[in-house]
Image (tube, helix red, strand yellow):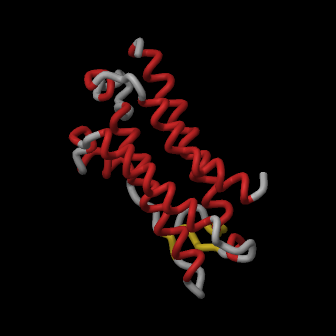
Amino acid sequence: MTITDTIAAYARGPALVRAAFAGISPAQLDARPADGSWTIRQIGVHLVESDLAATHRMRRIAAEGTPPLIIAYDESALAKNLSYDKDDLALVLDLFDLNRRFTAAWLGRVSSVEFLRYGIHNQRGRVTLAEMVAMYVEHVDHHLRFVQRKRAALGA
């Protein structure tokens, strides 16, 4: 896949997320899975939370002369302690869409050389800008598979 294809796939993320969340009732959004995993609403909030961090990381990789250190965060602690269950899903989806549009437009202006720049992730090691964009395409796909399974289990 070319970087142009990857950026296009990245930009399609919000439409995929909106489609996956369409028609889910508030009760279904907040249904607690028996296995203790996140609710559908928490997955939506996680997607925007993670994307905001990714945008910042991508921009640092492209802009900083020395490869930036990229620090992991505890996504479970964020979901647990930041009241994801209280977030307005419409606002979450709008923010996800706006951030993806903003980032995709910027990525479209990045030179092919800049996509080879990298940061050092404290858990993954060296990560190029191109790899990070691809990771966030897959990140949406990964979580939407969970949403599909949860919807099926709830009869949504």
Answer with left or right where residue 130 lies relative to residue 44.
right
20 or 53, nearer to the observer: 20
In the rendering, at what x and y percent does residue 3 appear? 73, 59
Is 147 located above or below residue 128 in the figure? above
In the rendering, at what x and y percent does residue 139 appear? 55, 46
Answer with left or right where residue 102 lies relative to residue 115.
left
Residue drawn at the location 74% of the way across and 76% of the way down: 113
In the rendering, at what x and y percent does residue 78 appear? 31, 51
Answer with left or right where residue 23 lies relative to residue 117.
left
8 or 41, nearer to the observer: 8
Residue drawn at the location 62% of the way across and 58% of the way down: 133
Residue drawn at the location 56% of the way across and 81% of the way down: 63
Q: Quadrant of residue 121?
A: bottom right
Q: Residue furthest top?
A: 155
Is 68 located above or below residue 102 in the figure? below
Where does the C terminus fall, quadrant-wise?
A: top left
136 or 7, nearer to the observer: 7
Q: Quadrant of residue 21?
A: top left
Q: Residue furthest right?
A: 1
